[in-house]
Image (cartoon, rainbow, N blue to C red):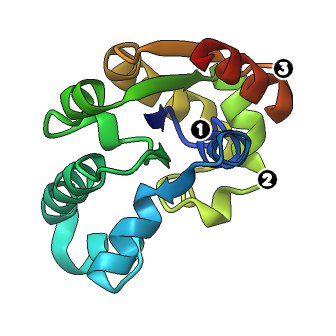
């Protein structure tokens, strides 16, 4: 079984993937960590040194590599991963996918306290953040919505979300 979590940043992909992988006794893979290990540098450095086009090509290459593994696992991917290079088709073809759907308010509230750790939004003023999130969600929703399952994460604990996902997998 290959399970992939997609969704916007701060939707809870990493936290939920960790719980689900533990509950199912499956290996946990974070695509960002995988890319950093393979490339020998952090993603922000890859973007700075080689640009987004290079990064997106490598992202697709490593996503395909991970999804081609024989073993079962739980994979969390970056917020943009499903939106480029036909990656959503690859995810749909080789895994069971879950879109962790968070509304603008939920994402905004989560990102405010961790903006500095998120290069994409670190430089955006707080008063412009909701508009930025709304625009991005609008652009990306068509990709995310193709997932096998859509799970609303608004006003739910990580344990409630994980339970809902495990029930769908049973």
Q: Quarter of the image holding residue 47? A: bottom left
Residue that label 3 marks? 155
Q: Quarter of the image holding residue 136? A: top left
At horizontal 33% and vertical 86% (from top left) the residue drawn is 40
In this picture, is 51 found above or below 73?
A: below
At horizontal 73% and vertical 40% (from top left) the residue drawn is 23
* Mark with earlier residue (3, 1): 1
Q: Nearer the viewer, residue 69 or 42?
A: 69
* Mark with earlier residue (1, 2): 2
Residue that label 2 marks? 113
**Disc 1 vs disc 2: which is toward the camera?**
2
Residue 18 placed where, x, y %? 67, 49
SS at circle 1: helix
Q: Tag 1: Cα neighbours inside 10 Å, few (<14), some, or many (≥20)?
A: few
Labelled disc at residue 128: 1
Residue 143 placed where, x, y %? 32, 21
Residue 116 placed where, x, y %? 65, 65
Image quarter hosting the N terminus = top left
Name the outermost residue toward the bottom: 40
* Mark with earlier residue (2, 3): 2
In this picture, is 37 found above or below 118?
A: below
At horizontal 49% and vertical 13% (from top left) the residue drawn is 149
Q: CA distance from mark 2 to mark 3?
A: 17 Å
């Amino acid at each position: 079984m290959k399970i992939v979590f997609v969704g916007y940043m701060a939707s809870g992909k990493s936290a939920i993937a960790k719980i689900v992988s533990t509950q199912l006794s499956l290996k946990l893979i974070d695509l960002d960590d995988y890319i950093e290990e393979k490339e020998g540098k952090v993603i922000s450095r890859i973007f700075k040194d080689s640009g987004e086009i290079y990064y997106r090509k490598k992202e697709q290459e490593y996503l395909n590599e991970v999804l081609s593994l024989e073993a079962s696992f739980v994979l969390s991917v970056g917020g943009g991963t499903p939106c480029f290079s036909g990656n959503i088709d690859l995810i749909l073809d080789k895994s069971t996918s879950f879109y962790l759907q968070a509304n603008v308010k939920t994402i905004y509230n989560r990102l405010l306290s961790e903006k500095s750790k998120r290069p994409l939004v670190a430089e955006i003023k707080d008063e412009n953040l909701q508009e930025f999130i709304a625009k991005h969600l609008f652009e990306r929703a068509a990709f995310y919505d193709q997932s096998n399952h859509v799970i609303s994460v608004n006003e739910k604990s990580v344990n409630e979300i994980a339970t809902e996902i495990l029930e769908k997998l049973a």
